[in-house]
Amino acid sequence: MNRHIYILSGLGADERAFARMDWGELEVHHISWLPVKRGDDFQVYVKQLAAFITEPHFILLGMSFGGMIAQEIAKLKKPDQLILISSFKGHWELPWRYRFIMMMRIDAMLRPSMFKQTSGVAQWFFGTKQKRNDGKLLKRIIDDTNEDFIAWALHPIVVWRGNKEIPTISIHGSNDRLIPIAKVQADYIIQHGGHFMVYNHADEISAIVQDVCRESAT
């Protein structure tokens, strides 16, 4: 197995979230978030990120918000396999609170700085502990997150409808509080995995990703 895998991290996060993953023989390409500001066109942004994919045959993997972006890129670039981690395939897999936010347009009222002031809440939603390594890493990621990026991303998240026609492999945690498993049609369920399971359940997820990539190569 000698395949290229392109990776999109979660909202405002970066490749640090994947620090414990074992990619085996895969050649890893992390796609970094580009600068953006509120009001920038979502599909234009997707095309800008898709331009970083130069290999004709590749695996595409998206975590959380990155999974949403990955599904849009898949319409343009046609990956050999599309893997979602702690993500969702459309509005039907999100809890009611997100649909309420969409209807009330609460996303337009939120200030991005609020997310950095609620790190304790974020730790709970992501299933991490402040004094553990995963909690410390999450806090650093939150502190480093670009506020303009958060401000821009909130609207696409709540209005994105998804597409049931795009084939995906979904890996989800049984204890994900941000995107609860109840509505997610997952192909693989990580027991006790939270939203940050790509870091604190990296061994299990690594094995699944390598198996999926190996099968797609045959």
Image (cartoon, helix red, strand yellow):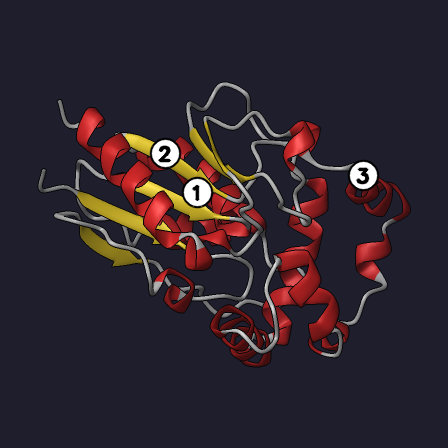
Question: Residue, x 65% and y 66% (percent of image)?
Answer: 123
Q: Residue furthest left?
A: 2
Instruction: Say whether disc 1 or disc 2 marks the residue closer to the N-terminus.
Output: 1
Residue 164: image x %, image y %?
Answer: 54, 21
Q: Mark 3 sits on what residue?
A: 99
SS of the residue under disc 3: helix
**Tag 1 near tag 2, CB within 8 Å:** yes
Front in this rendered view, residue 122 or 38: 122
Circle 3 crowding by C-alpha within 10 Å: few under 14, some 14–19, many from 20? some
**Tag 3 near tag 1, CB within 8 Å:** no
Count of labels in the image:
3
Q: Residue furthest top?
A: 165
Amino acid at circle 3:
Arg
Amino acid at circle 1:
Ala
Camera-near label (1 vs 2) is 2
> Which corner quadrant of the image does residue 183 belong to?
top right
Distance from Cα at disc 1 to Cα at disc 2: 8 Å
Distance from Cα at disc 3 to Cα at disc 1: 21 Å
Q: Mark 2 sits on what residue?
A: 82
Instruction: Say whether disc 3 or disc 1 marks the residue closer to the N-terminus.
Output: 1
Q: Quadrant of the N terminus?
A: top left
> Which corner quadrant of the image does residue 169 belong to?
top left
Residue 120: image x %, image y %?
Answer: 72, 72
> Which corner quadrant of the image does residue 110 belong to?
bottom right
Instruction: Say whether disc 3 or disc 2 marks the residue closer to the N-terminus.
Output: 2
SS of the residue under disc 1: helix
Residue 119: image x %, image y %?
Answer: 69, 74
Question: Residue, x 68% and y 57% (percent of image)?
Answer: 125
Distance from Cα at disc 3 to Cα at disc 2: 25 Å
Q: Which mark is residue 70?
A: 1
